[in-house]
Amino acid sequence: MKKIVRLTESDLMRIVKRVISEQQTPNEFCSVCPEWEDIDNDVYCEGKWTVKGNKILLNSKPFLGVGDDSEYISKPNGFDNWAKGLSSGKFIGNSDNSDTYKICFSK
């Protein structure tokens, strides 16, 4: 006997995000960045990250290569477990085609 299950849009989004996060390589950790929720959706940046206590310092190079910028953000949930004591690496930040901004850290 088949069972019909109804999913809300939020249930479906949660499932899709979980599948995507499980497909990430072990050298990469991606998360929505609450500090950048109001950022322009077209902004792309990359640079280096460094752990400073309970924060992460992002030293970024703007996409057009004009100047440098640095900013502290809170550690995303699960970051410490992924980093396992690692204190620096590279990152890429980009819009995830919604009202949020995703940042991906690499070792």
Image: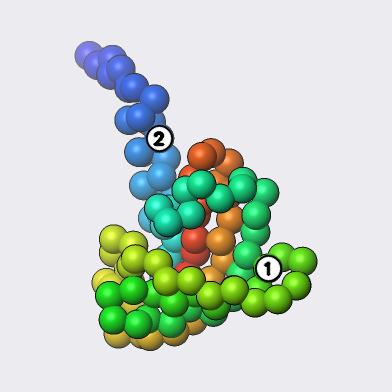
> Which SS class for mark 2?
helix
Q: Amino acid at mark 1?
A: Pro
Splitting the image into 4 quarters, where does residue 62 fall?
Answer: bottom right
Viewer-side residue, 27 vs 40: 40
Which residue was labeled with disc 1?
62
Residue 11 falls left or right of residue 92: left
Residue 14 seen anywhere in this rendered image of the structure? yes
Which residue is found at the position 28% from the left and 75% from the top? 54
* Residue 93 drawn at (x, y percent): 56, 61
* Residue 5 drawn at (x, y percent): 28, 19
> Which SS class for mark 1?
strand
- Disc on res. 27: none
Viewer-side residue, 9 vs 76: 76
* Residue 82 drawn at (x, y percent): 33, 72
Above/below status of 27 relative to 99: below
CB atoms of marks 2 and 1 within 8 Å = no
Viewer-side residue, 66 vs 75: 66
First in sequence, mark 2 or 1: give its number: 2
Residue 56 falls left or right of residue 80: right
**Mark 2 vs mark 1, CA separation in Å:** 30 Å
Residue 105 falls left or right of residue 41: left
Which residue is found at the position 25% from the left and 16% from the top? 3
Label 1 CA crowd tier, 10 Å (few <14, some 14–19, many 20+):
some
Q: Amino acid at mark 2?
A: Met
Which residue was labeled with disc 2?
13
Above/below status of 32 relative to 50: above
* Residue 18 drawn at (x, y percent): 36, 47
Which residue is found at the position 58% from the left and 41% from the top? 97
Which residue is found at the position 43% from the left and 82% from the top? 50
Image quarter of the N terminus? top left
Residue 24 seen anywhere in this rendered image of the structure? no
Colour scheme: rainbow
